[in-house]
Amino acid sequence: MVLNKSDIENYINQQNIPALTDLVPIAIKSPDQFDKTRLSDAIDGILNYWMYDFSCKKGGDPREYPFEEGLKAIHELTQKDVFLKEIEYQLACGDYCRDKNDFAIAQKFFLDVSDRLVKRLDSQPWDNQAYSRLVYTYQCFPTENEKEKLSYFEKALEVIENRFLSTNADFYFVNLDFLYRGPFPLEFESRLAIQRRVFFKPCIRKAYEDSLFALELAASLHHWLRYPHNPLTNEISADFIQIIEAASHCVSNPGNFDLVTTGQIFAQEGARFERIDFLHTAEILFERALKQSSAFSLIHVYIANNKIQEALLAEKSGDLQKAQSLRTWVKERYLQDWRLHQNDLSYLSHATEFLLNSVEADPNNEMSKNILSEIILMALASEKKGDTHYWFPYLHLIQAYLLLSEIEQVKFWFARGYRALNILVENEIKDFHKQLIKNKSSEELLQFVEKIIFHLDNYLDKRCWNGGLSYSDLTKMTLSDLENWIEATSK
């Protein structure tokens, strides 16, 4: 008997693990090794999909799934070690029970897992995944008892203190997450600080020896810094800066990494830690990325934003001439190149916003008027490319004509944006009204905007978008046409 490919595909679509495991004896007896591989991959794919759902808190109770049956089948077909997949499944069951406040059952899962992981590490101390999961079982032990939580936190810390193997790169990431992640229990601050020093010495040495490892660490730290509850103390900041410094060696020792993503890390951390050298590293990486076949227009925006951060640091240090020079560079680059990138809406949005800010302080001189003319062309290109689905082209046109004191044009573009998007931009419209009041704008314009807000609040069904006009139809409408639509629907 041979495996039927269409049967397997049907069972995969149904996520029918029992039916697939019934095929295991046939696959084992098959002379074609591909039968075993195909069946194993099918089962493994479903289990991975389920595990993803469990991690996202979807799919209900993991205990109701034939997960272990699937793991047993994979082992029989491939002889692969499925121990860690079993552990992940048991932890998913424990997490589910904890989330349902069934702490007694959750604790049984966690205690069983921790016992198995301790035995695993006794025989295979280099197993970083087992190490990671053991730290997790103690750190996240399901209990409402604060004293018990602290007891298990101490167990996690003991694992870090006694089992850290600096010869395996993956162990570093577990330690990084545990030792630097807050909030820390006050009782253990001293021990954590000592262990951070024990950890950091081999960590930074390895980072300087291997720039790709340093990059991975820098990326982890970058992700870590997104969470406001993580404490960025002077000590931790100093450690992070050293790791990013080590990662900067990737510029002279290029490897297989994403230039743009890495550039973003250096740009954002350069701004955070006010390090001009990190910003320079970011620019080198962005410029290198532009030479790749996969280059895209938004990289030019990343470079521009990086220059702006350099300008801010120059201002802070008192070098106003350099700051002005950097901003002028960005302005001239956008004005020179925007037509080359006018098919990229994100590029146009960033470029137009920067140019608007650059002329806002003094819109009436001749140079500013020339820039405003370009801004209007850029916003018109954005509206056309966006096919009336975005508010920012209208906002930029409104802002440009406000700076030019052309109130009729402001009214026209406000009405046109409202006709295109109406209820979708309610908050933006009301925020703009507040800004007009704050800036003491003309009474004529205030009354016009208030008329639109009254129409929005009283005559439009806010459950239903009243747009849908094509770009070509919208461009045929005059201000009178737009006002007539408002009047016609005010009934």
Image: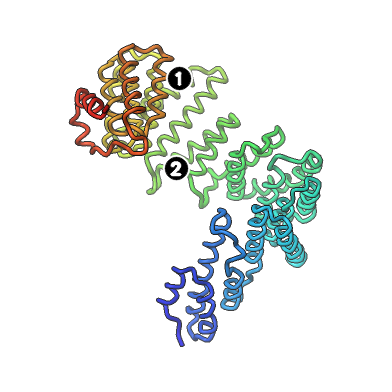
Q: Is residue 367 visible?
A: no
Q: Is residue 386 left or right of residue 280?
A: left
Residue density around tag 1, few if under 14, some if 14–19, many if 20 or more, within 10 Å: some
369 and 100: which is toward the camera = 100
* 267 up-or-down from 261: above or below: above
Give the percent coordinates (x, y) of residue 315.
Answer: 53, 20
Mark on residue 288? Answer: 2
Q: Position of residue 297 (x, y in %)?
A: 37, 39
Residue type beneath disc 1: Gln
Residue 417: assigned label: none
Read off the residue under disc 1: 324
- Indicate left or right for 175 with 72 as reference: right
Query: Mark 1 vs mark 2: which is more N-terminal?
Result: 2
Between residue 266 and residue 153, name the one nearer to us.
153
The quadrant in which the C terminus is found is top left
Regarding residue 115, the answer to whether it shows in the image is yes
Farthest bottom residue in view: 1
Q: Residue furthest left?
A: 476
Badge 1 marks a residue whose secondary structure is: helix
Say which element carries label 2.
helix
As shown in the figure, which amino acid type bears the numbered disc 2? Arg
Percent x, y of residue 76: 59, 78
Q: Residue at x 32, y 34 (%)?
A: 421
Residue at screen point 64% across, 71% down: 81
Taking depth in this image into account, of 314 and 443 the one nearest to the observer is 443
- Residue that appears at 40% across and 36% down: 300
Within 10 angstroms of label 2, few (less than 14), some, or many (20 or more) residues? some
Are circles 1 and 2 on residues that touch, CB within 8 Å? no
The mark lying in front, picked from 1 and 2, is: 1
Task: Tell me what residue is drawn at x 52 percent, y 51 percent.
Answer: 255
The quadrant in which residue 117 appears is bottom right
